Amino acid sequence: MSNNNDTEIEIRHLRYLVAAAEHGSFRRAAAALGVQESSVSQRIRDVEDQLGASLFLRHPGGINLTIAGQHFLHRVRHALNHIRDGAAEVAAIGRAEERYIKVGLFSSLSSGFLLILFRTYDEKHGPVHIYFVEGEAHEHVSALRQFQLDIAFVIGLADWPECDTTYLWSEQVLVALPEGHPLSAKDALT
């Protein structure tokens, strides 16, 4: 986001805005943040100029959010929470405190055997975060080769070069027919 002065809204500007809203004054926000009041005031003015809307009503006793300010503050808090959570998650992954497994599967396989398998795995190895990615076998194999998936459950007996594969199970395929259908009297269909 840039205006004709090439001013960009930075995360610290958004933190100033949140602090000002919480403290009800630029002076108290500055004190809480450990910066000069003029820095808070100017950065918030920059954000207002960038957005083209006043976020605060200024008065001798402090400041109050405008309607636009209230809406923007809600989104800013949401965005800052996402950034904070993302940073904490990445830091935990980097320190190997939390474990993640990214699993590719075909949507029809997401129940039955695999549901029991992942519940059991979670009980034995928690806290492991398992992320499921639905897709076709060729997409999953490509993602495995690019290290975007840790494991994939695919249908079929294709040979996938550069991948270790194991045949896990087979399931009966049932045919449902209405009562009285001519084929329903047969024991097997070919």
Image (tube, rainbow, N blue to C red):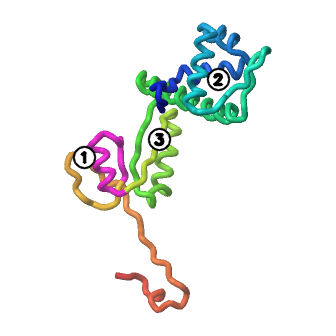
Q: Amino acid at mark 2?
A: Val
Is label 1 in a helix, a strand or a loop? loop
Residue shown at 50%/82% (left/top)?
177
Alpha carbon separation for disc pair 3 and 1: 21 Å
The segment highlighted magenta reads 136-153
Q: Amino acid at mark 1?
A: Cys
| Callout 2 crowding tier (Cα within 10 Å): few <14, some 14–19, many ≥20 | some
- State how far apart marks 1 and 2 are (Cα): 50 Å
Quick check: 23 left or right of 108?
A: right
Q: Are marks 3 and 1 in contact (CB under 8 Å)?
A: no
The reply to whether the magenta stretch includes residue 146 is yes
Looking at the rendered structure, the secondary structure element under dot 2 is helix
The residue at the point 41 percent across, 42 percent down is 102
Kindly report the distance in space between the C-alpha atoms of the residues bearing marks 2 and 3.
Answer: 34 Å
Residue 130 bears which disc, if any? 3
Q: Do the numbered discs 2 and 3 sit on residues whose CB atoms are within 8 Å?
A: no
Which badge, 3 or 1, is on the more N-terminal residue?
Answer: 3
- Taking 37 as reference, is 117 left or right? left
- C-beta proximity under 8 Å, tags 1 and 2: no
Is tag 1's residue or tag 2's residue first in the polypeptide sequence?
2
What type is the residue that disc 3 sits on? Ile
Residue 19: name its quadrant.
Answer: top right
- Chain-order first, disc 2 or disc 3: 2
Above or below 16: residue 55: below
- Which residue occupies 49% across, 30% down? 3
Which one is in front, 109 or 51? 51
Residue 18 is marked as 2
- Label 1, on which residue? 163
In the rendered image, the vertical position of residue 61 relative to residue 82, given as above or below:
above
Secondary structure under tag 3 reads strand
